[in-house]
Amino acid sequence: VQLQASGGGLVQAGGSLRLSCAASGNIFSINVMGWYRQAPGKQRELVATVASGGSTNYSDSVKGRFTISRGNVKNTVYLQMNSLKPEGTAVYYCNYASPGRNSYWGQGTQVTVSS
């Protein structure tokens, strides 16, 4: 499985960004795709996930500001990030996982939120 992420950049606090991730390769119909982030000196943490059935899961720190969704194009996932805060500065990684199989990571995209 290959994951291609895009959409990071520099934005002022309070602004918005949209991340995209497209999965290709040996994709199974039952899967979970999501976004994680890693700030300098910190561990990678969950941001949000969406299952193939549509259920979503969010970190408490982004609830109400971020929205994860599946695209019309199969195996594409988006993360709409609104009201961004400086503590959201991190490298954001796309993830694909399917029960009983390996988990895969994208290359990461930098999000920088200036105060």
Image (tube, grey):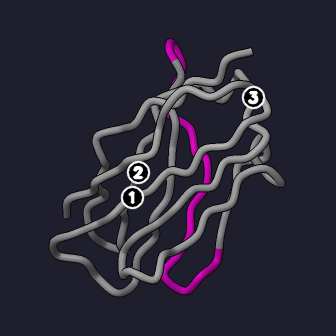
Q: Quadrant of the N terminus?
A: bottom left
**Residue 51 rendering spot, x and y as whole percentages:** 53, 75
Residue found farthest to the right: 64
Which residue position holds label 3? Answer: 85
Circle 1 sits on which residue? 21
**Mark 1: amino acid:** Cys
SS type, badge 2: strand
Label 2 Cα neighbours within 10 Å, binned few <14 / some 14-19 / many ≥20: many
Secondary element at image label 1: strand
Whether the magenta-drawn stretch holds residue 44 is answered as yes
Q: Residue at x 64, y 77 (%)?
A: 55
Question: On the picture, is 94 further left or further right than 102?
Answer: right
**Is residue 39 positioned above or below 109 on the image?**
above
Task: Please determine whether, in this image, residue 42 is positioned above or below residue 106.
Answer: above
- Which span of residues is magenta-colored? 40-55
Q: Residues within 10 Å of mark 3 (few under 14, many from 20)?
A: some
Name the residue beneath numbered marker 2: 94
Side of 110 where 17 appears, left or right = right
Decide which of tag 3 and tag 1 comes sooner along the chain. Answer: 1
Q: Residue at x 50, y 50 (%)?
A: 19
**Residue 108 horizontal/vertical position (percent):** 36, 38
Marks 2 and 1, Cα distance to the nearest angstrom? 6 Å
> In the rendered structure, which amino acid carries the disc numbered 2?
Cys
The disc at residue 107 is none
